[in-house]
Amino acid sequence: MRKMTKIEIITRPEKLEALKEGMNKIGVTGMTVSQVLGYGLQKGHREVYRGTEYNVNLVPKVKVEIVVCEVPVESVIETAKTVCRTGNVGDGKIFVYGIDNAVRIRTGEEGDSAILDPADIHKLK
């Protein structure tokens, strides 16, 4: 079984399409995307609604989760940094985790076979 790595990218919602395109170009075949709220250095911002000013402490972000075993982790990180960087506070974070196992529920396959495209598994054998 090859080493599997999970990369979690939290970034601006408007960067999602460019991030998906970038990942597709380097061979990432799947990802999970969630809409999340959070804050870091931004600490939110102030808005005015119907004449009343209020603090928005949590800022909308997207969280993209990718698990790879064939695509180099460094390629995923470099692509995400290039695509998501605006140079302003709030560009986001990238977290990298080791994965012990994965299971494809439909077939029961485990390990790297569970995250690879079935057509690619036959090529590797």
Image (cartoon, rainbow, N blue to C red):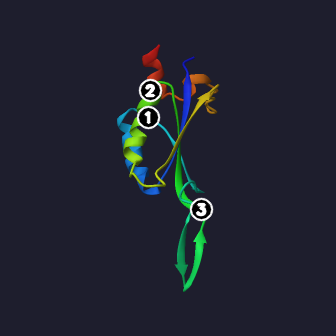
Describe residue 48's horizontal placement relative to residue 21 as left or right: right
Residue kind at label 3, given as amino acid type = Leu
| Residue name at image x 47 percent, y 13 percent | 125
Foreground: 50 or 19?
50
> In whole angstroms, how far apart are the C-alphas of marks 1 and 3?
27 Å
Which of the two discs, 1 and 3, labels the residue nearer the N terminus? 3
Q: Is residue 50 above or below residue 12?
A: below
Foreground: 25 or 85?
85
Residue 10 x/y as whole percent: 52, 48
Q: Is residue 105 above or below residue 112?
A: below
Q: Is residue 28 visible from the viewing direction of this image?
A: no
Corner quadrant of residue 40:
bottom right
Residue 98 x/y as whole percent: 60, 28
Residue matched to label 1:
76
Which-is-in-front pick, marks 3 and 2? 3
Q: Secondary structure at mark 3?
A: loop
Q: Secondary structure at mark 2?
A: loop
Q: Secondary structure at mark 1?
A: helix
Residue kind at label 2, given as amino acid type = Pro
| Residue name at image x 42 percent, y 57 percent | 14
Foreground: 42 or 74?
42
Residue kind at label 1, given as amino acid type = Val
Residue farthest along the left direction in this orientation: 25
> In whole angstroms, how far apart are the C-alphas of marks 1 and 2?
7 Å
| Residue name at image x 44 percent, y 30 percent | 74
In which quadrant of the rendered image does the N terminus lie? top right
Q: Residues within 10 Å of mark 1 (few under 14, many from 20)?
A: many
Residue matched to label 2:
72
Residue matched to label 3:
58
